[in-house]
Image (tube, coloured by chain):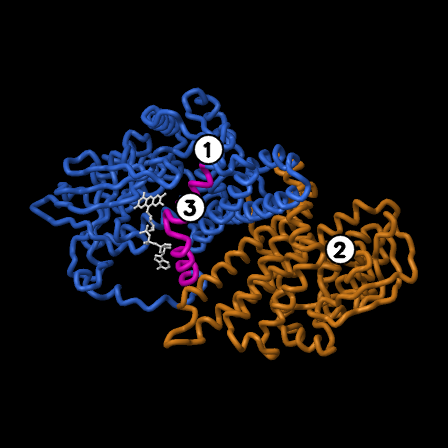
Chain colours: A orange, B blue
Amino acid sequence: MNFELDDVQRAAAAGARAFFAGSASPGDARRALGGGPVAPGRKALADIGYLGIPVPESAGGGGGSVLDLAVVAEQAGAVLAGPSLVTAARAAVLLADQPDLLAALADGSAAFAVLDGAGPSIDAAGADSFLALDGGALVVGSGKVTAGTPMDATRGLASVRLTSRTVLAEDAGERWARARDTALVVLAAEDLGAAARAVQLGVDYAKVRTAFGRPIGSYQAVKHALVDAWVGVEQLRSLVWWAAWAADSAPQELPLAAAAAKAFAAKTLERAAETCVQVHGGIGFTWEHDAHLYWRRAKVDRLLLGDEAEHLDAVAGLVLAGALDR
Amino acid sequence: MDFDDTADEAAYRAGVRELLDQHAAELVRLDSGEEAADAAQQERALRQTQRVLAEAGLVGVSWSREHGGQAGTLAQQAIVNQELARARVPTLINHIGLGMCGPTVVAHGTPAQHEKYLARLLRADDVWCQLFSEPASGSDLAALRTTAVLDGDEWVVNGQKVWTTLAHVADYGILLTRTDPDRPKHAGLTMFVVDMHAPGVTVRPLKQLGGQSDFNEVFFDDVLIADSERLGEPGEGWRVALTTLLNERVAVGGGGNDLGLSIESLATLARDRVPQLPPDRQVLARQAVGRASVAALANRYTGYRRYTAISRGGLPGPEASAGKLAGTAAAKLVADAGVRLLGDDAVYSRGPDSDDGRWQRNQAWLPGIAIAGGTDEVLRNIIGERVLGLPPEPREDKTAPFNAGSRS
Ligand SMILES: Cc1cc2nc3c(=O)[nH]c(=O)nc-3n(C[C@H](O)[C@H](O)[C@H](O)COP(=O)(O)OP(=O)(O)OC[C@H]3O[C@@H](n4cnc5c(N)ncnc54)[C@H](O)[C@@H]3O)c2cc1C
C-alpha cells in the first residue's frame, strides 16, 4: 500500500502554493464582492497550465491525473482562487473526444461553464461556452446569463438559459455522471484547502490573542473546537485522495468515493469556517477580516453539486447495493 | 498511489493466509462483539489460540529475534492483524501485553527480565495487564498514590489500582508506583513488574456498563517485589510510562481497522431492515447509514495513511491520537445507525437473535472506548498542544512536591 503523495505531487503542491500565494487572496475575494475581478482569473490559470492539467497532451494539455489536479485545487482553495478548477475537471471529461474544444479549455481561449439544469452553475457568470445535458445528449452553446447578488463572488454563480446548442454526443448520460463525480472530487479538494487554511488562521490567532491573562488557545473550549476542525480536515484529506485515486485508477469506486468526499467536505469546511469566525471574536465578524470569506465559501460550497443530504443518500444507496462487498 | 501490496507484502500475506488455514481448527473464531458462553473455557481457548499463532510465527512479528519475535516490520505486523481480522480470530488475549507491557519490558527491562518474560508473553503462557489508573488518578496519571518503599532488596507495595483490563486472568502486570512523595509528581514514580499471584494482591472484577466484566480493581497489601523486578531507575517511572503510552498509540494507530463494528456489517443489516420501513423512515435511515459510512470510510482511509507511514519505517506521532478520536466517533455513528435499525428490539439490552445482540453489545461497549487509553478530552488536549502547538493550560501541579500539593 502506498497511500501518500509522491515526490512529484508534493513538489507540484509546493509550486501551486507559491503560485496562488502570489496571484490570489481572500482580499481579492473581498474585492470581487464589490465587483472586482476574480483572481487569479482564467488567463493566469491557463498560462500556468492548471486549466490544462486534465487535458491530454495531444490536445495541448498537461495530461495529468485527477489526483494531480486535486493537489493543485487544494492550494487554490486555500486562497479562495477562481475560476474553479472544478469546471476544468468536469469539462475535460465531457469534451474527451473534442480536441479543439479541449485545446480552447486548456489555453483559456474559451470560457466554459457546465450547467446543472436551470439552477445556479459554477463559473457561469464569466463564461461564454456552456456545456449541458439536453435530453440525454451533451450539447455546447451560448446562453443568456442571469446572476444574483453573490454570497461568494469567486464562485461565479449564475443561471443560464441556452440560446444556441450544438450536439456533441448523443446518449451522454454515463459520461455526464462521470464528469459530475470528477467535479465532486475537485470541489472537495478545493474545500480541503479552504478548510485547512481557515483552521490555521484560527490556530494562529488563538496563540496570540489573550483574554483573562492568558492566550485564548489555552482555554479548552477554544482548543478543542480547533482540534475537532483540524481532525475533520485530516479525515477529509484521506477521502479526497481516495476519491481522486478512484477517478484515475478505479472508476467503479468513484461514485461512492466522490459522494463520500463531497458530503464530508460540506460539513468539514462549514465547521472550520464557523470555528474560524468564532475563535476570532468580534474582529472575525468584520468585513475587513478574512474569516467571513472562508465562511462565505463554506456556506455556498456546501450546496453546490448537491448538498450533504443528497450525497449521504447516494452513499447509503451505493452501500446498500453492495459497493463495499469487494 | 495505490492500495496494493508490494510483491514482498503480497508474498508475506499469502504465507500468513496459508498458516492460518493450516491451523484453522486450533483457533477460536468469533465475530467481534459476540460473547462466549463460558468465560473460563473461553480464556483457555484464547490462550491456546495465541500459543498456536506464536508457534506459527504470527505473534510479535516486529519484535527482534533476541526477544522472541520475528524481526519483521510494523507493516508485516499490520498485515497479520488484517489477516487475523479477516479470519475472524478475536483480539489476542494478551493484547495489552503485546501492545504495551512487552515493549516496555523490552525497552527498560534487564536481560534477565527479557529472558524470563518475553517468550512466555508472546505465547500467552503468561497474560499481562497494565496497572496504571487509580481511583484518584486516571487522566492525571502522575497523581497516583500507590506506594512502593524499599526494604533491603525488596520493595513493599501498598495501594489500589482500578479499571485494570484483564487483571482477573493476568499472571503479571506492569505497575506504576510512587516511591518518592517529596519530589514533584512526575519525578517520584517507579515502574515494576508485579507477579499477579503474589501474596497480598487481590483482584476484584468490576461489572461494566454493558454488564460484562473485562476490567477489575486490584488491591496491594504489603506486596513484596524484588528490586530486580524494577523497570528503569527509581524515580524514572514517568519516562518508562511514556514508553508504554507511546506503544499504546502504535497499538491503536495501526492499519485503519474499525474500532467498532464494520461498515460492511452495517450494510448487511441495512439491506435487510431498510426496505421494511415506511418510506419516510427509509429516508431518515438512509441518512444515518450514509453519515455513518462516510465517517467510517474517512477513518479507514486515514488509517491507510498511517499504515503507509509505518510501512516506510515511521513511527506514529501525537497526530495518531486523532485516529482514536475520529475512530470512536465513527464507531458510535455506525453502532447508532445499526441499533436504530433493530426497530422495537433497540430498547432491549439484547435482541432475540445473535445478530441483534451484536449491535446492542457494541453500543454498550463504545462509551468505554471513548474513555480508555486517554479520554476524548485528553486526546484533544494532546492534539491541540503537541500537533497544533496551542499553549497548555497554566498548571501548578507540575513543580510542587507531590505531598505538598492539593492531592484531592
Ligand atoms: C474499558 C476501559 C478499560 C480500561 N483499562 C485500563 C487498564 O487496563 N489499565 C489502566 O491503568 N487503566 C485502564 N482504564 C482506565 C482509563 O485509563 C481511565 O479511565 C482514563 O484514563 C480516564 O481516567 P478517569 O477514569 O480517572 O477519569 P478522569 O480523569 O477523572 O476524567 C473524568 C472526566 O474528566 C475529563 N478530564 C480529565 N482531565 C481532563 C483535562 N485535563 N481536560 C479536560 N477534561 C479532562 C475526562 O475527559 C472525563 O470526561 C480503562 C478504562 C476503561 C473505560
Q: Residue at x 31, y 31 (%)?
A: B124
| Residue under pointer 1 | B350
Q: Is mark 3 within 8 Å of ligand 1?
A: yes
Estimate how packed mark 2 is, as few (under 14), some (14 to 19) or many (20 or more) residues with alpha carbons within 10 Å.
many
Please name the amino acid that badge 1 sits on.
Arg
Mark 3 or 2: the one toward you = 3
Q: Secondary structure at mark 3?
A: helix
Say left or right for A220 vs A13: left
Residue A142 pos. (x, y %): 88, 63
- In this rendering, would A276 be left or right of A120? left
Which portion, as a residue range, is magenta? Answer: B361-386
Earlier along the polypeptide chain: callout 1 or callout 3? 1
Residue A214 picture quarter: bottom left
Residue B238 picture location, percent across and down? 26, 54
| Amino acid type of the residue tagged 2 in the rendering | Arg
Say which of marks 2 and 1 sits in front. Answer: 1
Q: Which residue is mark 3?
A: B367
In the foreground, A71 or A179: A179
